[in-house]
Amino acid sequence: MNVDKNLQEYIEMNIIPLYANNFIGDEQDRIAYVMSRSKKIIEENVLEVDDNVLYTVISYHDIRKNNVEEGHELTSAEIMYADAFLKEFFTEEQRLIIKEAIEDQRANAQKEPRNIYGKILSSASRNSSIEQCLERSYNYGKKKNPNATDEEIYEGAYEALLNKFGENGYAKFYFKDSTYEHFLHDIRELLSDKDKFIDKQKKYILEIKQRGNKHENK
């Protein structure tokens, strides 16, 4: 992206560090992932966007207060809209576009995002690999119910992902996106067999835990 250096420096110093407080899977690396996915979507669809606006939308979209998931898109939008630096950098019209894009990001939202930046963000912030999906759904289940057994989490992950990515799932996409289309084919195939899904997630989470243990013991 061709981003203004002053804007980039401000965000890198003052906003990106806030993501270190987020729950695992939604930390600083998540911003880089959404940036990368956004670039691919823009290139594949030959979209015209303002790089400064898009960069800001992505950078502010997942800020949490006390790592609270519910309504975090509204919290993120409020933080962005109140930012004194951004008030000086952008016009009021641009700030409203950024605010709407952040507010409209949720995949389970009933309404379509109001502008192109919201559609890009909503699309780019979704999972795009089986492994990413297995890990994030497990971590979310652990966060939501710390006392649940792994078996209960696997069951919950299956139901949640089937509801999101199944044939009649709520996750929509707004542009040609070959990466997401490939992922959608693979995750639907896996979700067609509940036992197969749970077995794959169980083995993958075990691998992650074993890698973590080896790293801690070094």
Image (cartoon, rainbow, N blue to C red):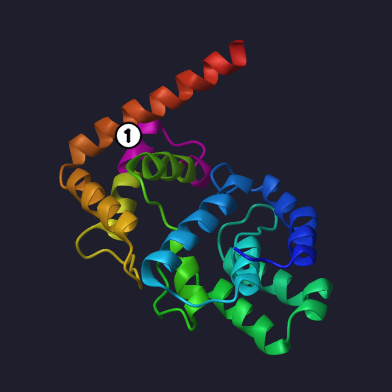
- The answer to whether residue 126 is above or below residue 137 is below
Instruction: Tell me the crowding category of disc 1: few under 14, some 14 to 19, or many 20 or more residues within 10 angstroms, Cα based.
Output: many
| Rendered residue at 72%/77% (across/down) | 81
The amino acid sitting under disc 1 is Gln
Please name whichever residue, 122 or 205, is drawn nearer the observer in this view of the structure. 122
Q: Which residues lie in the magenta part?
A: 142-155
Instruction: Give the farthest residue toward the top.
Output: 218
Please name whichever residue, 44 or 123, is drawn nearer the observer in this view of the structure. 44
| Rendered residue at 59%/70% (across/down) | 54
Q: Is residue 125 visible?
A: no
Residue 94: where, in percent of width, then height?
A: 66, 83
Instruction: Give the farthest residue toward the bottom.
Output: 93
Q: Main secondary structure of the magenta part?
A: helix
Q: Residue 145 in magenta?
A: yes
Question: Judging from the image, what secondary structure is the residue with disc 1 in?
Answer: helix
Q: Kindly identify which residue carries mark 1.
A: 201
Residue 19: where, in percent of width, then height?
A: 67, 50
Q: Looking at the image, how many numbered discs can be counted on the residues?
A: 1
Q: Is residue 16 visible?
A: yes
214 left or right, relative to 154: right
Q: Residue 99 in magenta?
A: no
- Quarter of the image where one finds residue 123: bottom left
| Rendered residue at 60%/64% (across/down) | 61
81 left or right, relative to 178: right
Residue 197: where, in percent of width, then height?
A: 24, 38
